[in-house]
Image (spheres, rainbow, N blue to C red):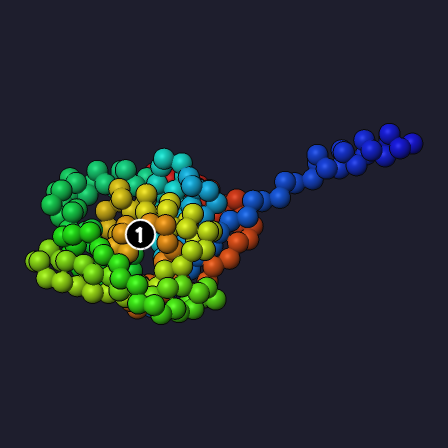
Amino acid sequence: MRTRAWFTWLGLMLLAPAAAPAATVAVWQLADGQALQVEYEDADTLRLTLGEDLALLVDGSREFLLQRQQGGQWRATEVGQLRSQLQRWLGNADIDALRGQLPGGERLPQIDSQAQLEATGRTETVAGLRGQVYRIHLTDARGLPVVHEAVLGDAPELLRLQQSLLRLASGLPGLQLPPALDALPETALLRYEQQMRLVRLEERALPASRFSLPQVTR
């Protein structure tokens, strides 16, 4: 009797749907009022969503731009194809000009030297996370000094997500993260001036569709 009950329990366990792995979800508020949401499952699987109609999906070594069409359907275009089209249409010089821009469209200073961080000794709580306030000393392309302020923390889940963003931004025109991340990549960005401010960080299960390509793909 016990043997039958054990096999019944095992059969139910095998038939039960597997629980979705927990994903990290981070949301930053941008200066233009839009929200940048990043959903991170692992180093090769993440989704960036800007507003309601534009997203970027990373699936292993491939990146796809997702655009919402009329009727609510999403269309996916492989970023490699877009890059080739931009090179034909604009040329490499104009593609390089797209760099240095936050996802919301606000430009960052063109940096000519590595950022230098200076601890202020102050702390600030952002989205419930306590971080250290730093001044970031930069030199722009004209040789002029630029000083920005950032709040950096050490939340491990945010660090993992951020490291994937850095790898993505290094090869993607038009997506540049604040220079503080390159200067000290072992810290998590909570706030950069008023251009990026973390408003939510959580871990929760997400449906598989969040990391899947839509039916319309080219």
Residue at image point 43% right, 47% down: 160
Q: Which residue is mark 1?
A: 184
Q: Residue at position x 51%, y 57% from top?
A: 202
Is 218 left, or right, of 140 in this rendering?
A: right
Q: Give coordinates of residue 74: x percent, y percent.
A: 41, 49
The residue lying toward the viewer, choosing from 123 and 61, is: 123
Residue 74 seen by the camera: no
Residue 86 location, quadrant: top left
Along the line of sight, which residue is nearer the eye, 120 or 95? 120
Q: How many marks?
A: 1
Q: Quadrant of residue 59?
A: top left
Q: Residue furthest right?
A: 1
65 over 84 or under it: above or below: below
Q: Is residue 203 visible?
A: yes
Q: Please, what secondary structure does the residue beneath circle 1 have?
A: loop
Instruction: Using the rendered view, name the quadrant where residue 168 is placed.
Output: top left
Q: Position of residue 215 (x, y in %)?
A: 44, 41
Label 1 CA crowd tier, 10 Å (few <14, some 14–19, many 20+): some
The residue lying toward the viewer, choosing from 94 and 9, is 9
| In the depicted structure, whether residue 88 falls above or below residue 107 | above
Question: Residue 98 in the image: x percent, y percent?
Answer: 19, 51
Quarter of the picture holding the N terminus = top right
Give the residue at x 89% y 33%: 2
Looking at this rendering, what residue extends furthest in the front direction? 121
Q: Which residue sits at x=13%, y=58%?
A: 140
Q: In the drawing, does residue 122 fall left or right of residue 107?
A: right
Q: Amino acid at mark 1?
A: Leu
Does residue 4 appear to the left or right of 114 in the view shown? right
